[in-house]
Image (cartoon, rainbow, N blue to C red):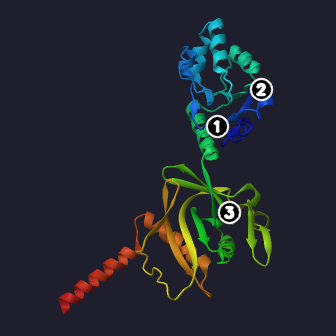
Amino acid sequence: MNKVSVAELVEANNLIVYAGGNFLNDRHVTTSDISRPGLELTGYFDYYPEERVQLMGMTEISYAHKMEHEKRMTIMERMCGENTPCFVISRYLSVPEEMEIAAKKHNIPILRSKLPTTRLSSKMTNFLEGRLAERKSLHGVLVDIYGLGVLITGDSGVGKSETALDLIKRGHRLIADDRVEVYQQDEQTLVGEAPKILQHLLEIRGVGIIDVMNLFGAGAVRTSTDIALIVHLENWNKDKQFDRLGSGEQSVQIFDVSLPKITIPVKVGRNMAIIIEVAAMNYRAKTMGYDATKVFENNLNNLIQENSKNS
């Protein structure tokens, strides 16, 4: 089961440790759902999701401060479940004394943030969804081309890494080489990133491993990007028919997301970096409503109609 330590949650969301700093690595989050324990403050614990991060904002804290000491102590004790990862207080609101006592007794960290509750909840949810999502490792190279995530695939030795190097020299950015970790962020978005051991590294046959950030600067790399397009490189075969007009649409299903795919034949003398760059630009034009293939087909139909009238 995937899990995230509270220490990672603190670092990624700029949280302030109010109490329980010694237990940040011992407590773990296993779900991206965030709990706002309003009902629990009233004493309703029939369904208490103790495994969630317990986020308290203005509503919860103001209600808690109006409770009598004995009841507040009882409620805070019940909220400290065995699997409760942490309490998070938004807007730098004051922490109830009873919460501090109960959390300390059960070794549960208390964290604070200056952010409003809704924004903080969204920020933590996005982080946890990314870290806890199911992941798949794909063979390929992921490059950011004009802000578009392009996954370059193909057989080993077809020239994926060399093409990526050309794209980097043309001002584009590397995300991952050889292995791409992919996870689904939402119903329409796949995110790709490099495994930690391969971040910023590129393998060029005959040269070896190069550090792209060290050679080309921080502007030549990104940690992750949304994948919008798959470009598959395939060795040129005269017996195989490749799409010449761009009308043969292909797609690849990864998790629940369908990604468009373009197959490009590789042949000596073809500049693959420029071709992939143009393919990315053409895909973006299509998403913005301009399809050169349809323009050509319309022009062709108009020409046929004109010739028919003149004949």
| Mark 3 surroundings: few (<14), some (14-19) or many (≥20) residues within 10 A | some
Residue hosting label 1: 30
| Mark 2 surroundings: few (<14), some (14-19) or many (≥20) residues within 10 A | some
Spatial CA span between label 1 and label 2 = 19 Å
Residue hosting label 2: 20
Q: Which mark is residue 179?
A: 3
Image quadrant of residue 158? bottom right
Residue 146 visible in the picture: no
- Mark 3 secondary-structure assignment: strand
Q: What's the residue type where badge 1 is placed? A: Thr
Spatial CA span between label 2 and label 3 = 38 Å
Pick out the residue farthest to the bottom: 311
| Mark 1 surroundings: few (<14), some (14-19) or many (≥20) residues within 10 A | some
Q: What's the residue type where badge 3 is placed? A: Arg
Picture coordinates of residue 115, whole percent (x, y)? 62, 33
Q: Which mark is residue 250?
A: none
Between disc 1 and disc 2, whose residue precedes? 2
